[in-house]
Image (cartoon, grey):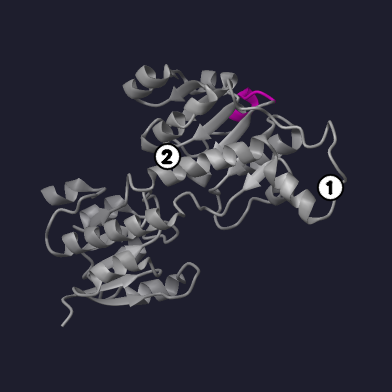
């Protein structure tokens, strides 16, 4: 008989489910959209473990509705959807899946960068609508990447991987981070500088910071006006790092040349006006969307959950203080 009662707010890849089945009485929300809040509150009442997504707000109300809850395993690197402080006070272990999606997200960052710089999506739309009338000297002129300056905002795992991928384009690397990244400085001659300087000097600005009170709207009107008119903004971090209402104005009025986004401030909703612009590439939060990465995320999330339920310290706790209580 299953030992632990758990709930999954969405179906995850089989690689994780097969680890959970032998040890858990498992229920899964099977529809392909965020679980309705009232249903979540109902389903967590008797569970000991919860495996959730970044799109699921796990706040005080949810935690209080689950008196037996011992582990929250987030199927994501970020965990700003969870009230971690309150969970810690309640003695609940919170975990995430870091590291595993670094390469997939770095690859997508470059896909977005190249797509917006070379106007690939505009070209695709032109072809599909039958508007291509033949080669023209002025058709869809974009920007070259080789030798340009790439500004990395947040030089952690993903930011570092994005910078590494610039080698083939011989780019100048600038980075903004709270601490030094000696690896980037030694391997890529990267220069650390304040955000204002980075924005003023970069041809491409790529965001890789977590969403915190300090980084919320880090890219605001002042920041966007500091960027070159020929520069591009790429965001694969968190949507609310950018003030999207201001970004719409910046793109519409030509403060910057373009933007490419995989995350959104009011996800899954788009900020009004964003979808009407031709100088922005919009992807549906697919930074980690490779078969290999999603399988690994499922395995890590499942193991985190099982370890916590078994009284072991999971590999990736985000609130290690809970073990000191």
Q: Is residue 256 visible?
A: yes
Q: Secondary structure at mark 2?
A: loop
Q: Which residues are magenta?
A: 223-229
Q: Which residue is mark 2?
A: 213
Q: Outermost residue, front direction?
A: 135
Tell me where residue 221 appears, x and y as whole percent.
62, 32
| Marks 1/2: CA–CA distance | 46 Å
127 sits left or right of 32 in the view? right
Q: Residue at x 72, y 49 (%)?
A: 124
CA neighbours of label 2 inside 10 A, class few (<14), some (14 to 19), many (20+) = few
Query: Residue 109 has which mark?
Result: none
Q: Residue at x 56, y 54 (%)?
A: 284
Q: Secondary structure at mark 1?
A: loop
Q: Residue at x 37, y 66 (%)?
A: 13
Q: Which residue is mark 1?
A: 132
Residue 297 belongs to the span the image colors magenta:
no
């Amino acid at each position: 008989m299953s030992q632990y009662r758990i709930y999954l707010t969405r179906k995850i890849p089989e690689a994780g489910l097969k680890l959970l089945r032998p040890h858990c009485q498992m229920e899964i929300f099977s529809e392909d959209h965020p679980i309705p809040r009232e249903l979540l509150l109902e389903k967590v009442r008797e569970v000991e473990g919860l495996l959730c997504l970044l799109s699921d707000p796990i706040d005080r109300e949810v935690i209080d509705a689950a008196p037996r809850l011992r582990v929250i395993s987030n199927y994501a690197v970020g965990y700003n959807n969870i009230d971690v402080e309150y969970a810690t006070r309640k003695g609940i272990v919170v975990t995430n899946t870091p590291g595993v999606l670094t390469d997939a997200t770095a690859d997508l960052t470059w896909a977005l960068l190249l797509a917006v710089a070379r106007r690939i999506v505009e070209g695709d739309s032109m072809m599909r609508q039958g508007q291509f009338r033949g080669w023209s000297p002025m058709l869809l002129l974009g920007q070259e990447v080789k030798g340009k300056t790439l500004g990395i905002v947040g030089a952690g795992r993903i930011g570092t991987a994005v910078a590494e991928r610039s080698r083939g384009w011989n780019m100048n690397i600038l980075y903004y981070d709270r601490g030094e990244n000696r690896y980037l400085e030694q391997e890529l001659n990267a220069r650390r500088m304040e955000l204002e300087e980075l924005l003023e000097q970069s041809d491409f600005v790529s965001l890789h910071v977590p969403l915190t009170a300090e980084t919320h709207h880090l890219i605001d009107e002042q920041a966007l006006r500091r960027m070159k008119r020929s520069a591009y903004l790429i965001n694969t971090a968190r949507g609310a790092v950018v003030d999207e209402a201001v970004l719409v104005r910046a793109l519409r009025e030509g403060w910057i040349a373009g933007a490419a986004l995989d995350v959104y401030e009011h996800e899954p909703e788009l900020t009004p006006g964003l979808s009407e612009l031709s100088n922005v590439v919009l992807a549906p939060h697919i930074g980690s969307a490779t078969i290999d990465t999603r399988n690994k995320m499922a395995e890590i999330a499942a193991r985190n959950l099982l370890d916590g339920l078994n009284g072991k310290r999971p590999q990736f706790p985000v609130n290690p203080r809970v073990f000191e209580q």
